Image: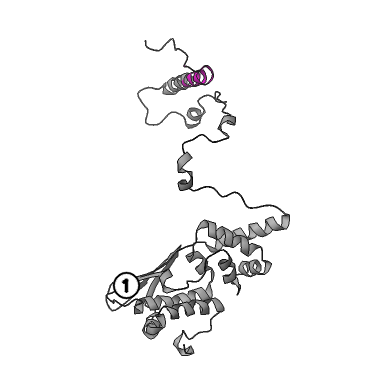
Amino acid sequence: MARSETPDQERRWWSERWWSVMESIGVAQRLERGKRYARAERLLSLEFDAGRIVAQVQGSRYQPYVVEIAIDPFSEEKWHEAVKELATQALFSAKLLSGEMPENIEDVFASVGVSLFPTSANELTMSCSCADDVVPCKHIVAVHYVLAEKFDADPFLLFRWRGLSRERLLRQLRQRRAAEAAGRALDHPRERTLEESIDDFWKLGESFDSLSISVGPPAVTASLLKRLGVPPFWKPHPEIRGSLERLYSKVTERAMALAYSGRAAKDPDADS
């Protein structure tokens, strides 16, 4: 592919890598028209989310076209493995913490069975609300052109698209680096998913027998009533606070009776 057929700007390696993927899925075939749209600032909005990029591109009609480019985000388990691996390499951690993307970072993701960059068009789902049957259309290409610039300026957008924000990534790296420096273990056993737990979901846990519950009267009776005072909407009965305090006291007595004798104490004032 001739150099003139790619966006004419100095790019860092990760945006070069991104554009090489775009060339492989046919974006370069419609680059010139997409580039004109991008340069004319017809891209009205661009929103990133985990697994999804949504943009609005102004075309020939009044209503802008909606472009969506989707990719599968990594699972929490894969991100956990990737961050753990990144934290073991001081140079990678240092570069990421300083806002750069290490050149061999793809090897780390490959070691846990995923690819940071898409490897084929099958990993991307691209759509546009225009009438063009060809995918990618010029509106999609315009978005890809701007994406290359966005990734070049902020490589962490690629991580965010794959499901982990810059803030979470850097926080987890710092925590792991600090734990490693202090000789502390940071990993905990992975919690089972609902699907894995469904067979024994309603069974008592092993530690249930040791569960201790203490039932006792409140330290201050009717503390909420005393703090809030009489409700301003209550007019008919000026002694409502006293009545409620006596009612709450009865509730406490019955709760204590149920907790420690297994049955409610008989209230002599209750109706038979």
- Residue 10 lies, in percent from the top left, at 53, 84
Magenta segment range?
A: 251-264
Q: Nearer the viewer, residue 192 or 154?
A: 192
Which element carries disc 1, helix, strand or loop? strand
- Residue 67 lies, in percent from the top left, at 36, 71
Q: Residue at x 72, y 54 (%)?
A: 183
Magenta stretch prevailing secondary structure: helix
Question: Is-magenta flag for residue 256?
Answer: yes
Taking 217 as reference, is 69 left or right? left
Three-letter residue code for mark 1: Tyr
Does residue 221 sit above or below 87 in this rendering?
Answer: above
Q: Residue at x 50, y 28 (%)?
A: 226
Q: Nearer the viewer, residue 236 or 211?
A: 211
Q: Nearer the viewer, residue 172 or 249?
A: 172
- The quadrant holding residue 217 is top right
- Residue 232 lies, in percent from the top left, at 40, 31
- Residue 215 lies, in percent from the top left, at 55, 25
Q: Which residue is mark 1?
A: 65
Does residue 115 sit above or below 227 in this rendering?
Answer: below
**Quarter the C terminus occupies:** top left
Q: Is the residue marked by circle 1 packed among few (<14), some (14-19), or many (20+) residues within 10 Å?
A: many
Does residue 231 sit above or below 256 in this rendering?
Answer: below
Q: Residue at x 44, y 77 (%)?
A: 146
- The quadrant holding residue 155 is bottom right
Colouring: one colour
Question: Is-magenta flag for residue 62?
Answer: no
Q: How many marks?
A: 1
- In the displayed image of the protein, which residue is found farthest to the front? 199
Q: Residue at x 47, y 66 (%)?
A: 161
